[in-house]
Image: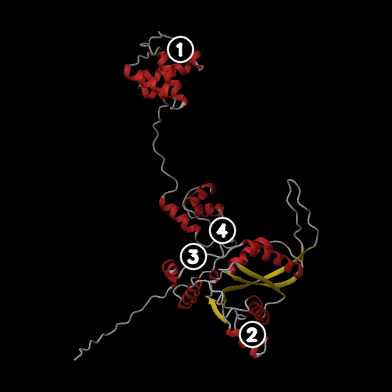
């Protein structure tokens, strides 16, 4: 059966515009060229399907199909594939089922498992008859869409809600950070970190092209030590000391060195640190004579960070940087550790500027409102006295 293509003037203009612009899909442009070549009203005369197919390097059946589409369904059907009329498929995961899977992923994992996996969630969803069957890939897409990551767990200091003691210490430290720099009354932050000394049981294999350094999993334990860090945020200064233990006497010796060696002219040092059992002026009396201890204590103004609020101590930033840049390896002896930390301290004091602390008391009262106790305003009777 021969199908006739007789284009109207409007249809011919439409096809010429598609061909000349070249912005349509390649398939649409090809169909437009075939229709223009097959037009019986055109100036080029009638061409057979074989001639048109050879002209555009297609099969004659393709030309026949395009002519058929134009004759039966019109121009738009001939330019593109006709849409299949299929009934809509209902989604397998409805909003109700999605909410159930989200709640399941936020619940405690099964006994004997530390966390939920995608396969565990898929199997549990089938067990609870949410579906007849579901792939763990579909569960993964659902969790990704809702930004849920049950395989991750972050360690964080979670402060108690509505805690007056936490708020009091927090605002005290935040107000201190907002004060202007004063050479005679410097603000110094202090923190400490335990460190395990580890030696190599076998010599590591050096790195080569295409192969990283190979380190044996077996190591030698050489004891532990304690690292003390002092930093003055506004001056961009820090000092690191390694001690064999973490006792009251060790802390007292570090404070005395801070006062007499590094800040001999300061009238008073405002010291920010965690509220540990060794971080008290009583430690000074255990280490020194009463007159020395008292003279040191008079030059200290101690500001404690709240419990579960160590993020308020700027020395924590220095400890974190120090751990990443210097301590993430095996160090076998305390002497070598002291040498390495001394080099790190010197380099960082030369390059690193002061810390620009941005979090203020006003920010805390807005963003950490849940930490503040609810005010209970008692009814007050106001008596107005008329003056005569």
The disc, 2 or 1, on the residue closer to the chain's N-terminal end is 1
**Could you say which disc has been placed on residue 152 in the image?**
4
Q: CA distance from mark 2 to mark 3?
A: 34 Å
Q: CA distance from mark 3 to mark 1?
A: 77 Å
**Could you say which disc has been placed on residue 49 in the image?**
1
Residue, disc 3: 358
The answer to whether the residues at label 2 and label 4 have Cβ atoms under 8 Å apart is no
The quadrant of the rendering that contains the N terminus is top left
Residue 375 is situated, as x and y percent measured from the top left of the image, at: 37, 77
Residue 220 is situated, as x and y percent measured from the top left of the image, at: 77, 66
* Kind of element beneath mark 4: loop
| Residue 359 drawn above or below residue 86 | below
Q: Give the crowd class for mark 3: few <14, some 14-19, many >=20 residues within 10 Å.
A: few
* Kind of element beneath mark 3: loop
Q: CA distance from mark 1 to mark 4?
A: 64 Å
Q: Quadrant of residue 47?
A: top left
The disc, 4 or 3, on the residue closer to the chain's N-terminal end is 4
Q: Is residue 256 left or right of residue 213?
A: left
| Residue 50 drawn above or below residue 320 | above
The disc, 1 or 4, on the residue closer to the chain's N-terminal end is 1
The disc, 3 or 1, on the residue closer to the chain's N-terminal end is 1
Residue 336 is situated, as x and y percent measured from the top left of the image, at: 76, 67
Residue 120 is situated, as x and y percent measured from the top left of the image, at: 55, 54
Q: Nearer the viewer, mark 3 or mark 1?
A: 3
Residue at (49, 60) in percent of width and height: 106
Q: Quadrant of residue 266?
A: bottom right
């Amino acid at each position: 059966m021969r199908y006739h293509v007789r284009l109207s003037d409007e249809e011919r203009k439409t096809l010429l515009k598609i061909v000349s612009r070249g912005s349509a899909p390649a398939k649409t442009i090809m169909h437009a060229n075939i229709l223009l070549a097959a037009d019986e009203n055109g100036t080029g005369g009638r061409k057979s399907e074989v001639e048109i197919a050879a002209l555009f390097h297609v099969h004659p059946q393709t030309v026949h199909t395009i002519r058929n589409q134009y004759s039966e369904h019109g121009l738009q059907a001939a330019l593109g594939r006709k849409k299949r009329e299929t009934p809509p498929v209902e989604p397998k995961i409805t909003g109700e089922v999605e909410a159930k899977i989200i709640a399941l992923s936020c619940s405690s994992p099964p006994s004997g498992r530390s966390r939920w996996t995608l396969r565990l969630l898929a199997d549990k969803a089938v067990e609870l008859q949410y579906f007849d069957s579901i792939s763990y890939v579909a569960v993964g897409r659902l969790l990704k869409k809702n930004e849920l990551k049950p395989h991750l767990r972050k360690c964080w200091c979670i402060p108690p809600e509505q805690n007056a003691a936490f708020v009091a210490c927090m605002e005290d430290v935040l107000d201190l950070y907002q004060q202007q720099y004063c050479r005679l009354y410097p603000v110094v932050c202090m923190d400490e970190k335990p460190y395990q000394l580890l030696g190599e049981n076998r010599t590591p294999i050096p790195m080569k092209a295409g192969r990283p350094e190979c380190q044996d999993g077996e190591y030698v334990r050489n004891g532990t030590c304690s690292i003390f860090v002092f930093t003055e945020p506004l001056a961009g200064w820090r000092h690191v000391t390694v001690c064999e233990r973490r006792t009251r006497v060790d802390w007292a010796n570090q404070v005395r060195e801070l006062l007499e060696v590094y800040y001999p002219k300061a009238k008073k040092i405002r010291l920010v640190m965690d509220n540990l059992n060794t971080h008290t002026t009583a430690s000074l009396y255990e280490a020194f004579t009463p007159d020395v201890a008292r003279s040191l204590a008079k030059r200290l103004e101690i500001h404690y960070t709240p419990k579960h609020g160590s993020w308020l101590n700027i020395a924590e930033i220095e400890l974190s940087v120090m751990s990443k840049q210097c301590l993430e390896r095996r160090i076998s002896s305390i002497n070598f550790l002291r040498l390495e930390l001394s080099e790190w301290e010197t380099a960082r004091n030369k390059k690193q500027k002061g810390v620009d602390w941005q979090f203020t008391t006003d920010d805390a009262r807005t963003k950490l409102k849940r930490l503040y106790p609810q005010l209970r305003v008692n009814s007050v009777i106001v008596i107005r006295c008329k003056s005569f």
